[in-house]
Image (tube, grey):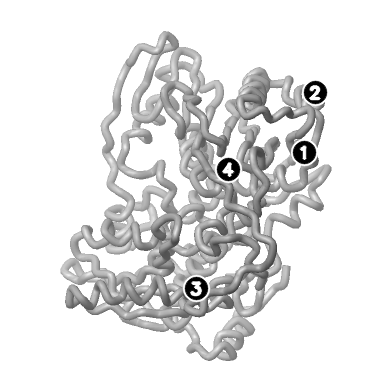
Amino acid sequence: MKKIKRRDFLKGSLAAGVGVFTPFSRVLGANDDIRVAMVGVGSSVKVGGIGKKMMPGIRRVPGVRIVALCDPERAHLDPEVREFKDRHETCEGYVDVRKLLDNKDIDAVVVGTPNHWHVLVAIWACQAGKDAFVQKPFSHNIFEGRKAAEAARKYNRIVSATHGSRGRSGVGEAFAYARQGNLGKILYVRGTTYRRRNSIGKVSRPQSIPKTLDYDLWSGPAPILPVMREYLHYDWHWIWPYGDGDLGNLGIHNLDACRWALGQETLPERVLAVGGRFGYEDDGQTPNTMITYYDYQPAPVIYEVRGLPTRERYKGIASGIVVHCEHGYIVGNRAYDNKDKLIKQFEPTNQDSFTNFFKAVRSRKSSDLQEDALSGHLSACLVHMGNISYRIGKETPSGRIREIVRADKNFTDAYERFGAHLAAYEIDLEKHPATLGPWLKMDPRQEKFVGEFSDRANQLRTRDYRTPFVVPEKV
């Protein structure tokens, strides 16, 4: 990875034609509005952009004003700015986030960009004296997530991760009930994302860049690559330089819940993934069917992804987690015994994510956050660990995979479900073998892989950043 010093970063910013970030932090009084900028407004032919979807929720929080929007795609940015002006609300539009961060009339940013931009915007915001609310997944790789947590601490900024399990739902109260031993020991956690994902199609040549898009800014930390997919927007989720597949799209919500349920504030010591992109030939790079085993002790996490349509449910859910204990289990905000009899239902005692973030912005206490930068980083690392095992794996005969997974009955059961799901689409794993990743051993303190395969795995802990869009070693 290319290293860059702080002074070199400042030179790079100046060379790009923008001002130097001067740390600035306004002291908020009880009656002062918090002035917010949305970074990554986004919209798409396929789905509405997450930035656009977040705006109504932010606008409902008392004492909070959206005063600026930023997006490198003018076709997305300009209509949203006009809507504010039509309501006679002051709202500035920016194409370049660096110019937005130079604005001292902004107190906090909400980051709704593609994944590869999340951490860099958060770090730059901290350096500019602004707080940050970062969309899921918190990071695009292991290295940069740790750097965001370091920046939040160094600059005393409020940086919130927004992994959906931490919202106002009652699941945290249910998890606490399980951790307290009310259902006996926790044995394992099973997570699922059964969500249909259609083919993204296959193009024969690079697609044209919209004239309304600054593709250099959109690419940011990623390399400038030809657009080899039909839809530039949204379908980046399935392209490795920008997205993290379904583990990082919907799976992160439930993986965060898995770690929360176990009370784990560290990374698992081992991970193994098996999967593939089955059912169609398209330009997507990430798996659409996958099992990931996280070797937490004493209770592991087994996570399953289904991208092809399925009516399969587990304990009544298509997407969520089940915390299996000796004498029962937790689903959502409910506790059941092993005969599926409801024992207890839990009501939420926390706040919604936006209210919680802005409360912490006022209090200046990161401890008020339901999920701070460090917690968000650890949960996002589960995404990255699973993806890394898969990415350095190879197609493997089904019999060999069975040999590998048979040491754990629940893992074996998951693989049998995996095969049955694909067989329903007449996908024969003997003819179209799954990719089996290696067991990767993690040093949780160093957040680096060790042992066999570690050289290849650690190359994917980070990326080669493109100047001046560099996540620095020292924030």
Which of disc 3 and disc 4 is earlier in sequence?
3
Q: Which mark is residue 399?
A: 2
Determine which quarter of the picture holds residue 77: bottom left
Residue ID for mark 1: 438
Three-letter code, disc 1: Pro
Q: Nearer the viewer, mark 3 or mark 2?
A: 2
Three-letter code, disc 3: Trp
Q: Is residue 379 visible?
A: yes
Residue ID at (39%, 58%):
48
Q: Secondary structure at mark 2?
A: helix
Which of disc 3 and disc 1 is earlier in sequence?
3
Which of disc 2 and disc 1 is earlier in sequence?
2
Cα distance in 3D space between marks 1 and 2 = 16 Å
Which of disc 1 and disc 4 is earlier in sequence?
4
Q: In the depicted view, which residue is nearer to us: 228 or 122?
A: 228
Q: Secondary structure at mark 3?
A: helix
Mark 3 neighbour class, 10 Å CA radius: few under 14, some 14 to 19, many 20 or more: many
For residue 263, above or below residue 113: above
Residue ID for mark 4: 266
For residue 326, above or below residue 20: above
Three-letter code, disc 2: Gly
Task: State the residue lying farthest toward the top.
Answer: 339
Residue 295 position within the rendered picture, expressed as x and y whole percent measured from the top left: 65, 32
Q: Which mark is residue 420?
A: none
Residue ID for mark 3: 124
Which of disc 2 and disc 3 is earlier in sequence?
3
The reply, left or right, for residue 123 in relation to residue 5 is left
Q: Nearer the viewer, mark 4 or mark 2?
A: 2
